Image (cartoon, rainbow, N blue to C red):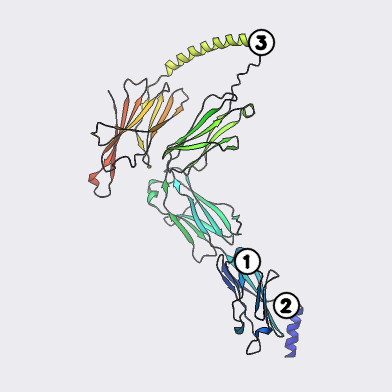
Amino acid sequence: MIVQVLFLLCLQQTGWALRLSEHQGMMGKNVDIPCSFRVKDPTIDRKYLSIIWSFQGKEILSVQNVLVKSKDPRMSYRAKAEDGIADLSISNITITDGGIYKCLTSYKSEKEEKEIRLDVQAPPQITITNKVVVKNKESSLQSVISGFYPVDIDIKWLRDGEMLGNDIMGKPQKESDATYSVRSSVKITPTEEDRERIFSCRVQHESFTAPLREDFQLVYGDTPSVHISSQVFKLDVEQRLVCIVSGFYPESITVNWFLNDTLLENAKTERISSSAVESVYYFTPTKQNFNMELRCVVDHATLTSPHVERLLVKVADLTARYKKHTVIASVLVVVTTAAIIIILLFIKERKTRVPKVRRINRFPDGTFSLDVDHFYPGEITVSWKVIQPPSSTQPRTIKSIITMDPNQDGTFNATSTCESLRGEIEEDEDYVVQAVVEHRKLKHPKCTEWRGGYNKNKGKGNALSWTSFSKKIT
């Protein structure tokens, strides 16, 4: 017996390694770190009992007699010393609570010391940040996986349970609470058949016994068209710049103005309809921003990267630098202007073309648009009306906007967009949407109609059938 005691003392003095046990806890939950002890006495007198808990080498809780002292209000001792239990209770544990704990118990001349490693885990959460796609066009599905610990994680994308390739996982970022978050994306080219399929983001992490999966269906959208409306810049003269964005779905969209890489915070964006907005910025060009670049940057769920429209600041400084040449310059201006007018009249006559009126398009959000191609001159009018029932003699006017784009041959293209009719018509009754185009090269205004209504042959389900045709108003 004496030999055994001397052997144990020798082990302690020579740095005998304690047996390390492991314990796990989940972030945000309560945990009891186990520690038990044995004494020779059949009954324990608590005035001789001492329990000391330390973490990473620093004392955090002590029990002397019946007095409990804790350095952290989350840490407490609720065990029964009479049963030989010295468990440490920690409420609402965090990632930083993970590490090596020591439990030292002493009773009279008897001492026991144990080490316990607490491993704290945090389960990830999946947030699908983009599920909007464009049919038959490469699109990106995106998600954020957040709040997990430890950092090792596996992310996969599925379609009807089958794994997709081309997935990309970013570098995990450490958050203020010591957990991690990471972005993941996958590129797909959606087809019509994908509308009914189930897509999933699946995550495997050691905090789960089974993978976590978030299922969703695709949202089919329309990409925006962007056009900047401006005039010739004049030095120190304020000008109204308008960035018109139209034809997009879903409705959420972001439009910002930049001067080179500087965000212009005074721009104001207003919604025209569910699929059209305009962003207005009042800009006063100075000599300092000559040859700088104005940019209208549009961010939408259908875009894999923001769409950028650019406008170079070219200021016409009207200050005369060489006064002695004023007379000569004036004569040259008159002669040059006359020659330009003659040339422009000749070119204008040659470029005059009759507008090509396309069919009316209806978008998923209920708005309508009409394209008119390759016409000259650029002055054109497109007016919209709705007629319900089709036999009605009192059509209602629909508000619309029109955007213009020049072609390389000097002609113009125009897109006219009108508001959604949802809430404005009876959708179970036939109606006609009418667009009338007026241009100087048309002998008569040209009318295009789109018809819609309730299809009784489909039975239940309020199915709709659509037809379209064009005619000239004589």
Per the image, the residue denoted by label 3 is: 324
The residue carrying pointer 3 sits among few (fewer than 14), some (14 to 19) or many (20 or more) residues within 10 Å by Cα, namely few
Residue shown at 45% from the left, 42% from the top: 137
Q: Residue furthest front?
A: 67
Name the spot of residue 451 as percent of width and height, x first. 29, 36
Locate residue 34: give its quadrant: bottom right
Asked if residue 149 is positioned above or below residue 326 in the image, the reply reads below
Mark 1 to mark 3 CA distance (whole Å): 84 Å
- The residue located at (60%, 34%) in the rendering is 260
Kind of residue indicated by mark 1: Asp
- In the rendered image, residue 180, in percent from the top left (x then y), is placed at 58, 57
Q: Few, some or many C-alpha atoms within 10 Å of disc 2 (few <14, some 14-19, many ≥20)?
A: few
How far across and down, in percent of the image, does residue 268 sit?
51, 37
Q: Nearer the viewer, mark 2 or mark 1?
A: 1
Q: Earlier along the polypeptide chain: callout 2 or callout 1?
A: 2
Q: Earlier in the sequence, mark 1 or mark 3?
A: 1
- With 106 as the anchor, is 348 left or right in this view? left
Q: Disc 2 residue type?
A: Trp
**Residue 97 has which mark?**
1
Q: CA distance from mark 2 to mark 1?
A: 26 Å
Question: Which residue is the site of mark 2?
Answer: 16
Q: Residue at x 54, y 27 (%)?
A: 239
Asked whether disc 2 touches disc 1, contact meaning CB atoms under 8 Å apart, the reply is no
Q: Amino acid at mark 3?
A: Lys
